Image (spheres, rainbow, N blue to C red):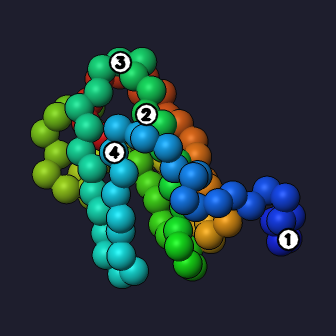
Amino acid sequence: MGPVPSDYFVDPKTAMPDYDQLTTVYAGDKHLISIRIKEKSRICWQYMTDDDDIGFAIHFDPSFQANNLTEMEVVFPYIRLECTNVPISGHYVAEKAGNC
């Protein structure tokens, strides 16, 4: 990998249009979202930072019984990226119903 070309940079004020959920996560903090999903549901995300990098992962519980992340299956492994100038986006399609 190498530096991102500047023509890929976006204006942070206009990069994040109206989404279902917009959240600020401060340095050193964690933000967990629990979503009950149906089979074949598609979860989409887009995020960027004001400065530095951020970590992201998706865990899945088909039993609807898990009490913490260690009891859940990792379906999108933890990744830590610098995303100050270019938003990170992606999606996950659930093979079965459960909690993410």
Distance from the alpha carbon under mark 1 to that under mark 2: 29 Å
The residue located at (54%, 59%) in the rendering is: 13
The nearer-to-camera label among 3 and 4 is 4
Q: Earlier in the sequence, mark 3 or mark 4?
A: 4
Distance from the alpha carbon under mark 3 to that under mark 4: 22 Å
The residue located at (57%, 52%) in the rendering is: 14
Q: Earlier in the sequence, mark 4 or mark 1?
A: 1
Dot 4, crowdedness within 10 Å: few (<14), some or many (≥20)?
few
Q: Name the residue carrying label 4.
A: 21
Q: Name the residue carrying label 1.
A: 2
Distance from the alpha carbon under mark 4 to that under mark 1: 31 Å
Q: Earlier in the sequence, mark 3 or mark 1?
A: 1
Q: Amino acid at mark 2?
A: Ile
Q: Name the residue carrying label 2.
A: 43
The residue positioned farthest toward the top in the image shown: 39
How far across and down, in percent of the image, does residue 21 sit?
33, 45
Left or right: where 62 falls relative to 74: left
How far across and down, in percent of the image, does residue 19 sit?
41, 40
Q: Name the residue carrying label 3.
A: 39
The nearer-to-camera label among 3 and 1 is 1
| Residue 12 sits above or below residue 90 on the image | below
| Residue 85 sits above or below residue 46 on the image | below
The foreground one among 44 and 100 is 44
Label pair 2/4, CB-CB below 8 angstroms? no
